[in-house]
Amino acid sequence: VKGGAETTLDELGQIAGRIADLLKQIPGTIDVSTDYQLRPETIIEPKPQVATLFGITNEMIVRSTQFALNGVEVTEVDFGGQEDIDLRILNKRQDRNEVKDLKELPIRRPQGRHVTLDQVADVYQRMGPNQIRHRDQDRVLRVLADVDDNVALVDDVFAQLKQKLKEARAA
């Protein structure tokens, strides 16, 4: 399913879902699915006016959250092998997975005192796409199905799907 710049990913997801529903009606199709999957994503939107009052820049917000989520490489260790091993300091896993913990992340002000992330940024979760594929700069979603060749031929399934799509457009 391919959509232009004016087509939202949600609209493409709905179209892909309708096509998958049509495919499921065709005898011989199995494991019908789309690759449109949503997952929670954490959004951090700096509050520029408030952050400036505390002497906090967007770069400081980004750096602090990256350190909290991805850790900080402190050194490389050579155990005598062919590769050096990076050593990182990380927050505890449970402190990296909760929005409330991220909101409480301390950010050091230039004067040495701290503010919490939620004082200088809005932090929330929303559902977002697992991945976004493109073809010729347009967003695309895949509708996937296997065909039981004891029941139907791929060409027959495709022909039936084309007919069902034609009927759906006419309705």
Image (cartoon, helix red, strand yellow):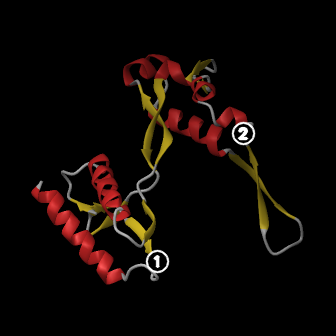
Locate residue 155: give its quadrant. bottom left
- Using the image, tell me which numbered label, if any, was put on residue 45: none
Residue type of the residue flagged with mark 1: Asp
> Quarter holding the N terminus?
bottom left
Upstream in sequence: badge 2 or badge 1: 2
Q: Secondary structure at mark 2?
A: helix
Residue type of the residue flagged with mark 2: Arg
x and y percentages locating residue 140 in the rendered image = 31, 62
x and y percentages locating residue 65 in the rendered image = 57, 36
Q: Nearer the viewer, residue 159 or 140?
A: 159
Name the residue at 34% across, 54% down: 17
Q: Nearer the viewer, residue 110 or 99?
A: 99
Q: Is residue 148 above or below residue 22?
A: below
x and y percentages locating residue 164 in the rendered image = 22, 65
- Please identify the residue farthest to the right as the structure is shown: 80
Name the residue at 61% across, 22% down: 104
Residue 19 placement, left or right of 54? left
Alpha-carbon distance for marks 2 and 1? Answer: 44 Å
Q: Is residue 36 above or below residue 93?
A: below
> Pointer 1: what residue?
148
- Using the image, tell me which numbered label, if any, was put on residue 93: 2
Q: Secondary structure at mark 1?
A: loop
Name the residue at 73% across, 42% down: 90
Locate residue 52: give its quadrant. top left
Q: How many marks?
A: 2
Q: Is residue 82 above or below residue 79?
A: below
Residue 126 placement, left or right of 96? left
Q: Nearer the viewer, residue 39 or 161?
A: 161
Q: Nearer the viewer, residue 99 or 68?
A: 99
